[in-house]
Image (tube, grey):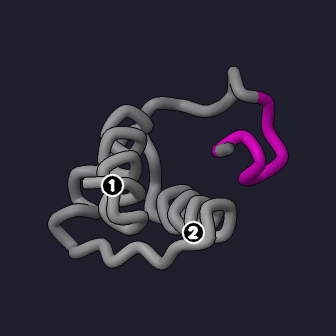
Amino acid sequence: MLAGFGDRGPDQVGEVLDSLELTWLVAQVEQRYGVELELSDEVFAGMGTVTGAVDTLATALDRARGDG
């Protein structure tokens, strides 16, 4: 999904995310899954890497859908 930001290949996506990439990623997840994620500043702070974003967004999606 992040490769779509800036029209890059997956191998060009680094582990560290900047604020624009993170904002774009959250918007894409919300659009794709039809949810609105309520993420605090503390949650965003833990999403500075692809790994952190994946873990955090999976948990947030579960909560938004009532699964967790």
Q: Is residue 62 left or right of residue 46?
A: right
Residue 17 screen position, x and y as percent:
45, 47
Q: Main secondary structure of the magenta part?
A: loop
Which residue appears at 29% of the width and 63% of the height? 44
Residue 16 forms part of the magenta stretch: no
Instruction: Classify residue 33 by image quadrant.
Output: bottom right
Q: Quadrant of the N terminus?
A: top right
Task: Determine which residue is flagged by label 1.
Answer: 67
Mark 2 to mark 1 CA distance (whole Å): 16 Å
Residue 49 screen position, x and y as percent:
37, 40
Judged from the image, the secondary structure of the residue bearing numbered disc 1 is loop
Q: Residue furthest top?
A: 11
Residue 10 screen position, x and y as percent:
71, 27
Residue span colored magenta = 2-9
Number of residue marks: 2
Q: Disc 2, disc 1: CB below 8 Å?
A: no
